[in-house]
Image: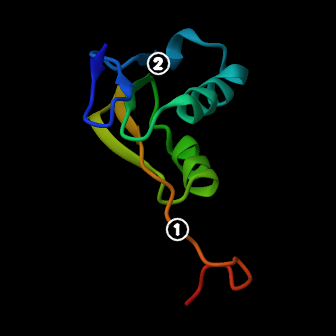
Amino acid sequence: MNIDSTHCAVPAVPPVIDVRLIPPAQRHGLIFQHFESLPIGAWFELHADHEPLPLKQQFQSLWPGQFDWEVLEAGPTQWRLRIGRRPAAQSCCGCCSGAR
């Protein structure tokens, strides 16, 4: 483990989630659970056998502006992504759905 400047433990080698090894019905739940457990600034690598666009859409819906999504390899037989956690943006009271 490395320690960053804020004294939060950050793994020296971020984890890899290879969804090809996980039953399809369990994939997104496991990925979401892992993302929610990440400290701000941490990331993990995701490996898949297809382009995970539905997953990205779910991330955009659940955590708008709170994640980084970097494609490291784009098919045709393997996709590799780096998904990182950003701090939550400050929002208004919510009565206007964020419109200003």
Q: Where is residue 78 shown, x and y percent of the image?
A: 36, 24
As helix, strand or loop, the secondary structure at mark 2 comes to strand
Residue at x-position 63% and y-position 52% = 62
Residue at x-position 68% and y-position 28% = 29
- Can residue 77 be seen? no
Q: Earlier in the sequence, mark 1 or mark 2?
A: 2
Nearer the camera: disc 1 or disc 2 = 1
As helix, strand or loop, the secondary structure at mark 1 comes to loop
Residue 38 or residue 9, whichever sits in front = 9
Instruction: Specify few, some or many for label 1: CA neighbours under 10 Å numbering under 14, 14-19, or 20 or more.
Output: few
Mark 1 sits on what residue?
Answer: 90
The colour style of the image is: rainbow
Residue 6 or residue 56, whichever sits in front = 6
Residue at x-position 31% and y-position 42% = 70
- Can residue 5 be seen? yes
Mark 2 sits on what residue?
Answer: 17
User: Type of residue at label 2?
Assistant: Ile
Left or right side of 46 for 91: right
Q: Is residue 85 above or below residue 32?
A: below
Q: Where is residue 7 shown, x and y percent of the image?
A: 33, 29
Residue 11 or residue 29, whichever sits in front = 11
Q: Is residue 87 above or below residue 3?
A: below
For the C terminus, the quadrant is bottom right
Instruction: Specify few, some or many for label 2: CA neighbours under 10 Å numbering under 14, 14-19, or 20 or more.
Output: some
Dot label at residue 64: none
User: Type of residue at label 1?
Assistant: Gln
